[in-house]
Amino acid sequence: MTQYIEFLKEWMAPLGEITSRAMFGGHCLYCDGGVFAIVAAGELYLKVDSENRPAYEAIGAQPFR
C-alpha cells in the first residue's frame, strides 16, 4: 500500500502539497492541509460535494459505501 500512496502523492502533486496519514485501516489524503480523498483496500475515493457531484455522476462514479 505504501508504494500506491507514494504514487498518488507524486501524481497529484500539481494540485498542491499532498500529504497522507494512516487512518481506519486505510489512508487519508490531504491537499494543502484539507482532506480530499481516502484510500481503502487499495481503492481511491475522492471527496464529493454539491458543487462537483454532477461531474462525478456524469462519468458513472459511484459513492463510497
Image (spheres, grey):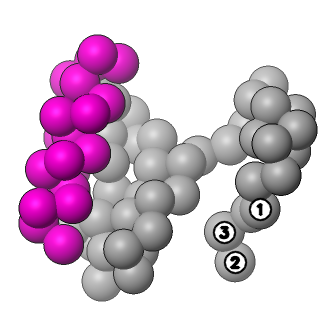
Q: Position of residue 5 (x, y in %)?
A: 20, 56
Q: Nearer the viewer, mark 1 or mark 2?
A: 1
**Residue 43 covered by magenta stretch:** no
Please provide the residue range marked out in magenta.
1-21
Look at mark 1 in the image and give the residue it sits on: 62
> Is disc 2 placed on a helix, strand or loop?
loop
- Cβ–Cβ below 8 Å for labels 3 and 2? yes
Q: Which quadrant: the C terminus?
A: bottom right
Compared with residue 11, is residue 64 higher up or lower down, i.e. above or below?
below
Query: Left or right: where does residue 8 sit relative to residue 6?
Result: right
Looking at the rendered structure, the kind of residue marked 2 is: Arg
| Residue 34 in which image quadrant | top left
Compared with residue 23, is residue 33 higher up or lower down, i.e. above or below?
above
Badge 2: residue crowd in 10 Å (few <14, some 14–19, many ≥20): few
Badge 1: residue crowd in 10 Å (few <14, some 14–19, many ≥20): few
Query: Left or right: where does residue 56 sit relative to residue 29?
Result: right
> Is disc 3 placed on a helix, strand or loop?
loop
Q: Spatial distance from mark 3 to mark 2, Cα to Cα? A: 4 Å
- Cβ–Cβ below 8 Å for labels 1 and 2? yes
Compared with residue 49, is residue 62 higher up or lower down, i.e. above or below?
below
Looking at the rendered structure, the kind of residue marked 1 is: Gln
Overall secondary structure of the magenta stretch? helix
Looking at the rendered structure, the kind of residue marked 3 is: Phe
Query: Left or right: where does residue 65 sit relative to residue 55?
Result: left
Q: State how many labels appear.
A: 3
The structure residue drawn at horizontal position 31% and vertical position 30%, both measured from the top left corner, is 12
Q: Position of residue 32 (x, y in %)?
A: 28, 24
Look at mark 3 in the image and give the residue it sits on: 64
**Residue 15 covered by magenta stretch:** yes
Q: Nearer the viewer, residue 35 or 43?
A: 43
Look at mark 2 in the image and give the residue it sits on: 65
